[in-house]
């Protein structure tokens, strides 16, 4: 689904018809995700990366507004449109293009959207608050930014001690108590990164779980940002360094901004990567992967995936290029159309033996009658399918096709319930697959 929403408050809400794979928002760039649960849904507040409309040659972060997204299953996301623009921030520079990583919290039925922005006067960044009666807005920005708070990447913690805390990145990691309606700090900020190993960069996310306070943050040790964490028994530290949640990106998206959220009993890491913009890492996209906590409260490292979270219905167009695993020697990934990245990708299986696996497909209660392949191939190819428990099915013959072609074949597949699907190339070479799907 492709659309452009330009109105300040976009009333026309849109739902992505694609099931959850990474990235989760597939029609625009989204970065710096903060996920919050309001009213039984997950709400995603993100930066909205764009190419600078005024200085396209200026290859840097550029954001003029924010959208809010919501989901009840982390797979299908509703875009509630623009919730705040740079022109509607009284204290901000209306042409600053600096609406960086935000947060949003609910207090007594009001929603407080906390965001950094370039001020109308003076250098750097300030942090302000916009208030709404609903998580989707409309948000009204306050006249002034929060006094004494200069920096980026705000995060708000409503702690079990009854206090609210604001954290941000500005000359290191700062944390302070803030008053109930988030208009002013209570006391002086505490610099929290000092006792930690050097390398704190930005983007702190603080949360409380089972009596522990977790400080999670981008941390650079080598080339790009890892996500690291530290723990404390006190919201303002000192925090003890614990380790890395996510390693640096292998293909050099320099930033990795994140948040963690518990939803329906599971924990998830929201983070970003430049999936749709491999040549320019300031146009990023939000991803989600599962997080597991150990018994002692420590966090297991998260491997970034294309597959993401959730279960895909067998009758959906299963985007096999968002695979769980792949045989690396002769498989590769390409954009369907490099000039239209949001159209997505296809996967190429180079030679017999190449395979791709896509986990968690729900085949329902009755076995599929047909399997549909969207593919392209310079020569006749055949593939097999396996869901692990029974013998592979196939061969499925895919005649040579210069252009993208859809072929429907008897499935011969006995799968029911939720299964992982492995597709292997048996004969031929250079098979390019866009998606597969099953019909009853
Ligand atoms: O999106 C602009 C900046 O990049 C954010 O504020 C940082 O956290 C980094 O993701």
Image (tube, rainbow, N blue to C red):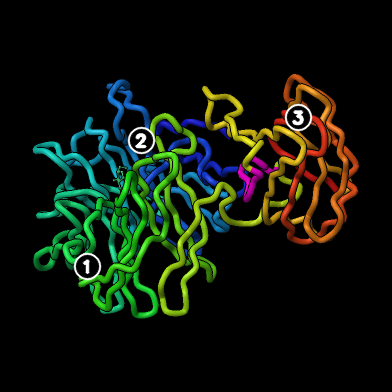
Q: Nearer the viewer, mark 3 or mark 2?
A: 3
Residue that numbered label 2 is attached to: 282
Q: Check if mark 1's residue and mark 2's residue have beta carbons within 8 Å.
A: no
Q: Are marks 3 and 1 in contact (CB under 8 Å)?
A: no
The crowding category of the residue bearing disc 3, from other C-alpha atoms within 10 Å (few below 14, some 14 to 19, many at least 20), is many
Left or right of 23 on screen, residue 366:
right
Q: CA distance from mark 1 to mark 2?
A: 34 Å
Task: Write the residue at 83% across / 31% down.
Answer: 398
Mark in the foreground, 1 or 2: 2
> Magenta span: helix, strand or loop, mainly?
loop
Read off the residue under disc 3: 429
Instruction: Please report the residue visible at 29 percent of the width from the left and 51 percent of the height from the top.
Output: 220
Q: Nearer the viewer, mark 3 or mark 1?
A: 3
Q: Residue at x 9, y 68 (%)?
A: 187
Task: Provide the secondary structure element on which disc 2 rests.
Answer: loop
Q: Is residue 406 above or below residue 243?
A: above
Q: Secondary structure at mark 1?
A: loop
Q: Quadrant of ligand 1?
A: top left
- Label 3 SS: loop
Residue 92, image x, y percentages: 18, 39
Between 395 and 69, the one lying in front of the other is 395
Q: Quadrant of residue 228?
A: bottom left
First in sequence: mark 3 vs mark 2: 2
Q: Which one is in front, 108 or 231?
A: 231
- The magenta stretch is 318-327
Membership of 319 in magenta stretch: yes
Residue 305: in magenta span: no
Q: Mark 1 sits on what residue?
A: 180
User: Could you tell whether 64 is left or right of 422 in the image?
Assistant: left
Q: Mark 2 CB in 8 Å range of ligand 1?
A: yes
């Amino acid at each position: 689904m492709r659309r452009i929403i330009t109105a300040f408050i976009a009333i026309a809400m849109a739902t992505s018809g694609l099931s959850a794979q990474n990235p989760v928002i597939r029609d625009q760039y989204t970065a710096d995700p903060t996920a919050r649960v309001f009213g039984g849904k997950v709400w995603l507040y993100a930066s909205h990366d764009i190419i600078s409309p005024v200085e396209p040659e200026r290859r840097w972060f550029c954001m003029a507004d924010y959208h809010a997204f919501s989901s009840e299953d982390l797979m299908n996301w509703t875009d509630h449109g623009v919730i705040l623009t740079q022109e509607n921030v009284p204290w901000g520079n209306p042409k600053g293009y600096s609406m960086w990583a935000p947060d949003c919290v609910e207090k007594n039925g009001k929603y407080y959207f906390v965001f950094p922005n370039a001020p109308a006067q003076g250098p750097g960044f300030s942090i302000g608050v916009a208030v709404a009666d609903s998580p989707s807005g409309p948000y009204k920005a306050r006249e002034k930014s929060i006094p004494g708070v200069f920096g980026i990447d705000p995060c708000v913690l409503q702690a079990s001690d009854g206090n609210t805390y604001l954290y941000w990145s500005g000359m290191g990691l700062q944390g302070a108590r803030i008053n109930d309606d988030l208009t002013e700090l209570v006391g002086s900020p505490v610099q929290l990164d000092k006792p930690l190993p050097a390398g704190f960069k930005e983007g702190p996310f603080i949360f409380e779980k089972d009596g522990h306070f977790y400080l999670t943050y981008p941390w650079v040790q080598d080339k790009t940002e890892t996500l690291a964490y530290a723990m404390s028994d006190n919201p303002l530290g000192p925090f003890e360094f614990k380790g890395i949640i996510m390693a640096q990106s292998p293909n050099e998206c320099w930033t990795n901004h994140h948040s963690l959220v518990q939803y329906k009993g599971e924990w998830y890491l929201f983070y970003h990567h430049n999936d749709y913009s491999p040549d320019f890492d300031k146009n990023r996209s939000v991803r989600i992967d599962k997080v597991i906590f150990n018994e002692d409260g420590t966090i297991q490292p998260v491997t970034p995936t294309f597959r993401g979270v959730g279960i895909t219905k067998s009758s959906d167009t299963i985007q096999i290029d968002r695979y769980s695993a792949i045989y690396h020697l002769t498989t590769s990934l390409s954009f369907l159309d490099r000039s239209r990245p949001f159209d997505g990708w296809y996967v190429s299986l180079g030679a017999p033996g190449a395979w791709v696996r896509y986990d968690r497909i729900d085949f329902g209660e009755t076995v599929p009658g047909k399997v549909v392949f969207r593919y392209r191939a310079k020569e006749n190819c055949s593939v097999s399918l396996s869901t692990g428990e029974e013998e592979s099915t196939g061969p499925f013959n895919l005649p040579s096709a210069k252009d993208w072609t859809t072929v429907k074949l008897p499935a011969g597949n006995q799968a029911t319930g939720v299964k992982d699907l492995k597709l292997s190339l048996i004969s031929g070479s250079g098979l390019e697959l866009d998606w597969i799907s099953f019909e009853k």
